[in-house]
Amino acid sequence: MSDKIMIFDTTLRDGEQSPGATMNIDEKIRMARQLETLGVDIIEAGFPIASQGDFESVKSIAESVTNLQVAGLCRSVTKDIDRCWEAVKNAPEGRIHTFLATSPIHMEYKLGKTPDQVVEMAEAAVKHAAKYTSNVEFSAEDASRSDWDFLVRVFNTAIKAGARTLNVPDTVGYTQPHEFYEMIRFLMEKLEMKSDTVISVHCHNDLGLAVANSLAAIRAGARQVECTVSGIGERAGNAALEEVVMALNTRKDLYDIDCDVVTEQLYPSCRRLSQIIGQPIPPYKAIVGTNAFAHESGVHQDGVIKNRQTYEIMTAESIGRQGTEIVIGKHSGSHAIKRKVEELGYTLQDDQVEAMFSAVKELADKKERIHDEDVEALVLEKVYRRRDKFRLRDMSVFSGTGEVPPHAAVVMEFGDEGGDVEVRKNTAFGRGTIDAVFSSIYDLIGYRASLESYTVNAVTSGTDALAGVAVRITHDGFKAVGRANDEDVVRASALALVNALNRLEITREERK
Ligand code: KIV
Ligand code: ZN
């Protein structure tokens, strides 16, 4: 009989530490619900002591899911542990995840503690956490650069103090698959494990080995793997959940291990994250990139036509990419629209289906072919977009190269639709049309954010292709990303900026 691997998703904690991946509470809850649909066992919702905002979001996530364990991260310090439990205690099952560094370099330079003091701190922290719950995880930060015998000492102390899960992080992505395999075997042999003790691994991708190291550890006996959707995370990121799961699935002959992830939800989950953080999935990304099931060379195409398995080791359908293509257009009924939206990973109430039906019809009058990305953009726009503080009502641009510099006229609405709406208008010059539009918007809202990044993608193909624009801005120490799709790239840019500004306002209010 095969064993089961626990999938511990840390997209909302380690993943959110990835530059530009900041999410507000609403977005985190949306992602948490998607992870629940995906079927992961545990989500790490955040680091509650980090700020009031982090505490609130972990608490709200814990209270929004129904069928998941929710972990909070905390240092091995009493006040962190208390705060962590306060945030996760209302989850269907809350977990305290406490960590302490065990490598010589971290103990000496970061903690300023001796190895004996570290063992004492670990013991005290786990004992304190275990007063709240039996679901305690202890992580030996920088384990892969720690002395193996010392790790055994720390972990055995943690087991005695009440830790059920022992996590072995490759914090700096330094280990190699064969070495990590040996390390996990060594720990499995030397630790005084109880019947419910679980060895977990948490691998970073600095050398591009996070997934390989996680799989090596699973072969050696680890039964929890920590990973993130699309592999986002600190620096080069964490092990990508979809890659670990599909490796276990595709090579079940080697691993013989079960996992509860609904693989058909992998692609919708990566899409959902990409929409939320405003960063496109790279086309070459394993499993979920656009190229992952595309065949360019004639020899490959010929093989795939004769038998897909000549060049495909998994089916697109198995990860939730369209198999039976539902084509959405002018004549689609509300059932087809509902099915398409579900295929993209969203669930709609009846009134939301109605709203989507009208929106699709409106778009179908303007566009010949409606792509999945169009439908998804409409779902986000019509169903999920929180009441915006300001909205772009109209705009026009002049792109001159002579004596009249590029300029833009913008009309914006401020306040609640249906309530008191103030309309403001403005024109501004710029170095180009986008610069002029941005200046005009900034003049209207009364402050200027700095633009950290700006990316444009052709979301769909053809001459009526949608331009997808993502911007990252900062103002007053707050960061936000915004994104929008439109047939017109300048308008998409303006909408993305307005989206980012609205999200910045939400974050500012949440932090207050
Ligand atoms: O990378 C790491 O060591 C971590 C721990 C806090 C688990 O993220
Ligand atoms: Zn990490």
Image (tube, rainbow, N blue to C red):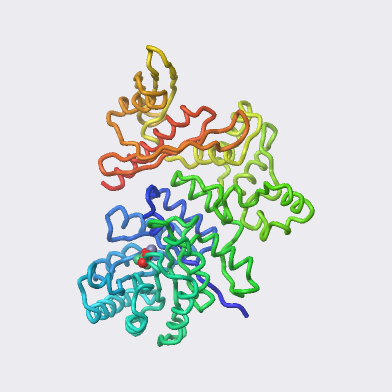
Q: Position of residue 62 (x, y in %)?
A: 40, 60
Q: Position of residue 351 (x, y in %)?
A: 56, 40
In the orientation shown, which residue stands out farthest toward the right?
306
Q: Residue 101: which quarter of the image?
A: bottom left
Q: Quadrant of ligand 2?
A: bottom left
Q: Is residue 291 visible?
A: yes
In the orientation shown, which residue stands out farthest toward the top?
403
Q: Residue 132: which quarter of the image?
A: bottom left
Q: Position of residue 190 (x, y in %)?
A: 41, 87
- The one of 258 and 283 positioned closer to us in this rendering: 283
- The one of 294 and 354 positioned closer to us in this rendering: 294
In the orientation shown, which residue stands out farthest toward the left?
112
Q: Residue at x 42, y 82 (%)?
A: 187
The number of callouts visible is: 0
Q: Is residue 12 visible?
A: no
Q: Residue at x 44, y 83 (%)?
A: 186
Please, is residue 161 above or below residue 83 in the view?
below
Q: Quadrant of the N terminus?
A: bottom right
Q: Position of residue 157 (x, y in %)?
A: 32, 83
71 vs 247, left or right, is left
- The one of 180 and 113 positioned closer to us in this rendering: 180
399 vs 463, left or right, is left
